[in-house]
Image: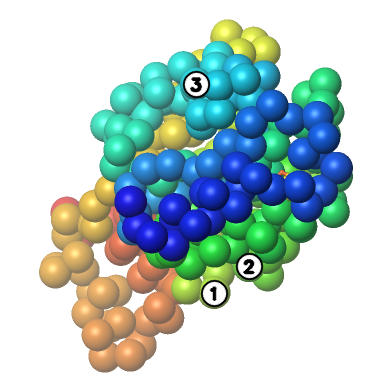
Amino acid sequence: MNIEFEQINRQIKNCSYCRLHETRINAVCGEGLIPSKFMFIAQAPGRTEDKKGKMFIGPSGKVFDNLLSHVDLKRDSIYLSNIIKCFLPKCRKPHQDEIETCYKLYLKKEIELVKPEIIVTLGYHVTKFIFKLYDLKVPNRIGLKSAFGKLFVAKNKKILPLRHPATVVHNSSNIDKLKKEYEILKTLQSKCAFIEKCPKFKEYTKGLTPVDFINLNCFGDWSKCEYYSQTK
Ligand code: SF4
């Protein structure tokens, strides 16, 4: 493992910076491919993760693996972390100061080292924090429902908010909805196959199309691009 990651992980394991260290069993470190195209960020470890000290090994982890396999991804082809490294007592909501402290100490550095092209935020609190960080307009809870599964571009980074796998743990009938939403991850694994023929991309090479359009479409969710059906 990268030496800087070993250092971060050692600090996480021994961290006592905020009140959460008093109630956790294990602080849980991020894991996976470094650098990585996809960096998934969940909220905080659950009870099983707290006991064992590993990412996503409880019921939500099982759902997550099922969703990853649905879109032809594996744990070792992504990087996966939590915004807060310690268990939230009684699974309560995170406090803003806990998110900010843990982000500044650890997640910020992880993002710098993983250099993801796409940050995938899982659930409301993580999405809200990352949207703010990248100067995106933060939707309210109702607005977020339509933002899930949609790609955003800000500060040269792609942000993809998705529903947290725990949604299925709470109600198993949600699995089809999440599978559909996660399918954008299949598209994002490659660029548009018709990029060479596309008039919009040709315009970009002459400086006539904004780079955000290209990142959102040609190198983003090209399956929904208005030029895709005309070009193929
Ligand atoms: S939540 Fe983060 S800042 Fe707080 S004790 Fe755990 S690792 Fe440290």
Task: Name the colouring of the figure.
Answer: rainbow
The picture places residue 130, in percent across and down from the top left corner, at 65, 57
Observer able to see residue 92: yes
In this rendering, the answer to whether 162 lies above or below 232 is above
Callout 1 secondary element: loop
- Disc 2 to disc 3, C-alpha distance: 29 Å
Q: Which mark is residue 57?
A: 3
Q: Nearer the viewer, residue 120 or 83?
A: 83
Going by the numbered disc 3, the residue's amino acid type is Ile
Q: Residue at x 61, y 48 (%)?
A: 12
Categorize mark 3 by other alpha carbons within 10 Å: few (<14), some (14-19), many (20+): some
Categorize mark 2 by other alpha carbons within 10 Å: few (<14), some (14-19), many (20+): some
Count of numbered marks: 3
Q: Nearer the viewer, residue 231 or 137?
A: 137
- Disc 3 to disc 1, C-alpha distance: 33 Å
Quick check: 49 left or right of 205? right
In front: label 3 or label 1: 3
Quick check: 52 left or right of 66? right
- Disc 1 to disc 2, C-alpha distance: 6 Å
Q: Residue at x 63, y 37 (%)?
A: 27
Going by the numbered disc 1, the residue's amino acid type is Lys
Q: Which residue is mark 2?
A: 134
Q: Earlier in the sequence, mark 2 or mark 3?
A: 3
Q: Earlier in the sequence, mark 1 or mark 2?
A: 2
In this rendering, the answer to whether 27 lies above or below 34 is above
Q: Which mark is residue 155?
A: 1
The picture places residue 87, in percent across and down from the top left corner, at 72, 31
